Each structure stands twice: as structure tokens, then as C-alpha cells.
């Protein structure tokens, strides 16, 4: 932290695991929250037609949500080190429900973009819950707890596409956001009852909010491992977003002309990502972080070979999606476990700063994918 801010004393590590039902509930709530950022991906073509957006601008729908997400990571996630975690988590979930309601009722493109930016801003509560799971777990089981909650996030992302596709076909795209608003409100009430309160350390309580936010940048300036793992996050999630933000366009047109439901169902092919999160968490607890990272990056590079054949074979796309999601989440869980260990007393700020790289990569991947597809089609996207 800056010299003018008091250096927080390290919080003692938990002596026991959190209650058995808490980590699964955090995983469910985290997955539901972050899913709201990805609802638009299978709906991009429909939203473009409804709000008169050209093919080159479809990526802006995803990008504006990711910009809100990046802002939330810097402005809201550090509050996890300053405020009571139960009040912070449940308050953000309540506001997220309101933002989703606004998105579902948006009358025009400006209102939609504003509601989606607010949704991204508040969806960062998922990262506050990752930090909470890490803080509530003893060091020997921290990787497993982070892996469980991250697995919930991965599952939420995958089911977001499938659920959005089904709901859009049955009741229109607005139903997607209105239903999510209701689910989010219920989860806020459940966590209000289950999540234990958590006060920050004395040193952090004495620091101002502004100094706490600035300290996020300072932490990354001081610790090379945070910068290295952040750069890896930017690159792997740029690849992730390039696929999932761009694939709706070739699947919506000839030769496939798939429905929203069918396009969203391809997200389920990436369910291996949820498996990877748990496996990576266990490998990290055994000290195999470097090996996990290497295997993940190699699989990520290989995944684009079958993905390039999407126009010829849907099976090739499914195989590539499995490899890509497995690889991305293996690296992601490894990254989160390692960066949290650098300064456990600053876990929320570190996770928030790390996820800024994630959000930047996701936004760049979405914009790059739509621009590349508009200029030269799917071969340009995969290249």
C-alpha cells in the first residue's frame, strides 16, 4: 500500500473449513451473478436486429458489459477488504437484480447499454465471493474452495448461454433478464442468512476507500507474480471471448442457421471447464501450479484447430470448445490461487485487480471477434 496508508496486519488463517453448505451456495450465487455478463452472447444477432446494430457493432454489446465489469473490479471488489462481507455481498446482489430488471425493460439501445454496463459493474460480486471463500478456508484447503466457487462460475457462464437461448425462444429476449432479476433477489436473501459476517483487520479499517483502491495498483506494481498472472488472464480470456462472442454469427447463418436454443446449447460443450476448475484446485494444493499452467496453455493453442472447422462440422466446434474451456479454467484457477497467496490480507483487492486483466481480455476478444468476422468471416476470427 502507499506509504501514507497504514499497512494492514495479516489476518489469521482460518483454523477450520467454512460450514459445509456455505461454499456450494457461494458457488451457486457466484455462477448466477457472473452469468448475467454472458446472457447476451447467444442473443447478439437478435439484439442487433431489435436495436438496429450492424454486424461490426455486435461486439459492443458484450464490450460495454465488460467495461462495467472492469470498473466494478477496481471500485467495488476492494470494498471486500474494508466492509463487512455479508452486507457487501447481499447489497450488491440486490442492486444487480435492479440492473437486470432495467435491462429486461430497456426501450432503446442507449437504455440497454446503460443497464448492461450497470449489470457488469455489479456482477463483480462474484469475485467478492471468491475472495470470501478463500478467506474463510484454511490454507490446506484454500485451492479446493477457490476451485469449487470458480467451478460454479464456469457452470454459470455455460448455463447462461443455454438458458438464455431457451428462454429467448420461448418468451423473447426480455424474459432472460427479467427471470435473472428474480433469481438474483432470492440468492441475496439466502446469503443474508447463511454468510457469516466478516470484519477487516484493524489496519485496513483505518485506511480510506481511496487509498484502498490506489493500493490495488500498488500491489501489482510491487509483486511481479501478480503482473505475470494478470497478463496470462488477459490473453486466455481474450481467446475465450473471441470464441463465445463470435460463434453466434456463423451458427446463425448458412449452412447451419441454428436457433437461440441450439446456439446456447453449445456452451454446455464447454462443461469441461467446470471439471478443470476442480482438478486445477487440487493440483495447486499439491504444488503443481507450473505444470497445470503449461498443460492449460498447450491445450488452449490446440483447441483452435478444430474450432477453425466450425463451418464444416459442428462436432469439430464442440471438441474445440471442450478443449478451450478446460484450458482456460485450469489456468484461471491456478492464477487465482497463486495471486491470493501473495498477500492473503489483501485478497479482495488482489482478486479484483487480477480480474481487471480478465475483463480487459474479454472485452478485446469480443470487439476483435465481431470486427474480424465483419471484415473476413470466421477464418479471420480463428486466425
Image (tube, rainbow, N blue to C red):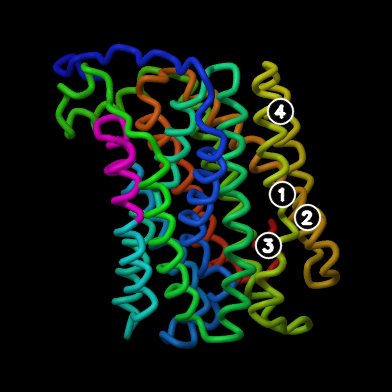
Which secondary structure is most common in the magenta stretch?
A: helix
Residue 267: mark in rendering: 3
Q: Which residue is mark 2?
A: 320
Mark 1 in CB contact with mark 4 (< 8 angstroms):
no
Of the image marks 1 and 4, the number of the one nearer the N terminus: 4
- Numbered marks: total: 4
User: Looking at this view, is 45 or 198 the one in front?
Assistant: 198
Q: Which residue is mark 4?
A: 292
User: Looking at this view, is 70 or 306 the one in front?
Assistant: 70
Q: Is residue 259 left or right of residue 207?
A: right
- Secondary structure at badge 4 equals helix
Horizontal and vertical percent for residue 136? Answer: 46, 27
Mark 1 to mark 2 CA distance (whole Å): 6 Å
Q: Report which quarter residue 329 is drawn in.
A: top right
Of the image marks 4 and 3, the number of the one nearer the N terminus: 3
Residue at 30 percent of width and 24 percent of height: 218
Tell me if residue 343 comes above or below residue 383 in the rendering: above
Tell me if residue 46 comes above or below residue 37 in the rendering: below
Mark 4 to mark 2 CA distance (whole Å): 19 Å
Horizontal and vertical percent for residue 295? Answer: 75, 32
Q: Which residue is mark 1?
A: 324
Mark 1 in CB contact with mark 2 (< 8 angstroms):
yes
Amino acid at each position: 500500500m502507499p506509504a501514507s496508508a497504514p499497512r494492514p496486519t495479516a489476518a489469521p488463517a482460518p483454523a477450520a473449513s467454512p460450514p459445509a453448505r456455505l461454499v456450494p451456495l457461494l458457488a451457486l450465487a457466484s455462477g448466477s451473478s457472473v452469468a448475467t455478463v454472458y446472457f447476451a452472447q447467444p442473443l447478439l444477432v437478435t439484439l442487433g436486429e431489435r436495436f438496429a446494430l450492424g454486424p461490426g457493432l455486435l461486439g459492443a454489446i458484450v464490450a460495454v458489459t465488460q467495461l462495467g465489469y472492469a470498473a466494478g473490479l477496481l471500485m467495488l471488489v476492494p470494498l471486500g477488504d474494508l466492509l463487512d462481507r455479508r452486507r457487501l455481498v447481499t447489497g450488491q446482489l440486490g442492486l444487480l437484480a435492479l440492473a437486470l430488471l432495467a435491462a429486461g425493460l430497456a426501450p432503446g439501445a442507449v437504455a440497454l447499454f446503460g443497464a448492461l454496463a450497470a449489470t457488469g459493474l455489479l456482477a463483480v460480486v462474484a469475485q467478492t465471493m471468491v475472495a470470501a471463500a478463500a478467506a474463510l478456508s484454511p490454507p490446506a484447503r484454500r485451492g479446493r474452495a477457490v476451485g469449487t466457487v470458480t467451478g460454479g462460475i464456469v457452470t454459470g457462464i455455460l448455463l447462461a448461454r443455454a438458458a438464455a437461448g431457451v428462454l429467448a425462444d420461448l418468451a423473447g429476449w426480455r424474459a432472460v433478464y427479467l427471470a435473472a432479476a428474480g433469481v438474483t433477489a432470492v440468492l441475496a436473501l439466502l446469503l443474508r442468512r447463511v454468510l457469516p459476517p466478516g470484519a477487516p483487520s484493524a489496519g485496513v479499517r483505518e485506511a480510506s476507500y481511496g487509498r484502498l483502491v490506489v493500493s490495488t495498483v500498488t500491489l501489482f506494481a510491487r509483486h511481479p507474480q501478480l503482473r505475470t498472472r494478470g497478463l496470462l488472464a488477459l490473453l486466455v480470456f481474450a481467446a475465450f471471448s473471441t470464441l463465445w462472442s463470435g460463434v453466434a454469427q456463423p451458427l446463425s447463418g448458412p449452412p447451419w442457421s441454428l436457433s437461440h436454443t441450439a446456439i446456447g446449447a453449445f456452451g454446455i460443450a464447454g462443461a469441461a471447464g467446470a471439471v478443470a476448475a476442480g482438478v486445477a484446485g487440487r493440483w495447486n494444493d499439491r504444488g503443481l501450479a507450473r505444470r497445470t499452467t503449461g498443460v492449460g496453455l498447450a491445450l488452449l493453442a490446440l483447441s483452435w484447430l478444430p474450432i477453425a472447422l466450425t463451418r464444416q462440422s459442428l462436432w469439430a466446434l464442440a471438441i474445440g470448445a471442450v478443449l478451450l474451456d478446460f484450458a482456460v479454467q485450469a489456468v484461471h484457477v491456478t492464477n487465482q490461487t497463486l495471486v491470493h497467496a501473495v498477500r492473503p490480507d489483501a485478497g479482495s483487492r488482489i482478486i479484483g485487480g487480477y480480474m481487471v486483466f480478465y475483463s480487459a481480455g474479454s472485452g478485446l476478444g469480443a470487439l476483435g471477434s465481431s470486427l474480424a468476422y465483419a471484415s473476413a468471416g470466421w477464418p479471420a476470427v480463428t486466425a
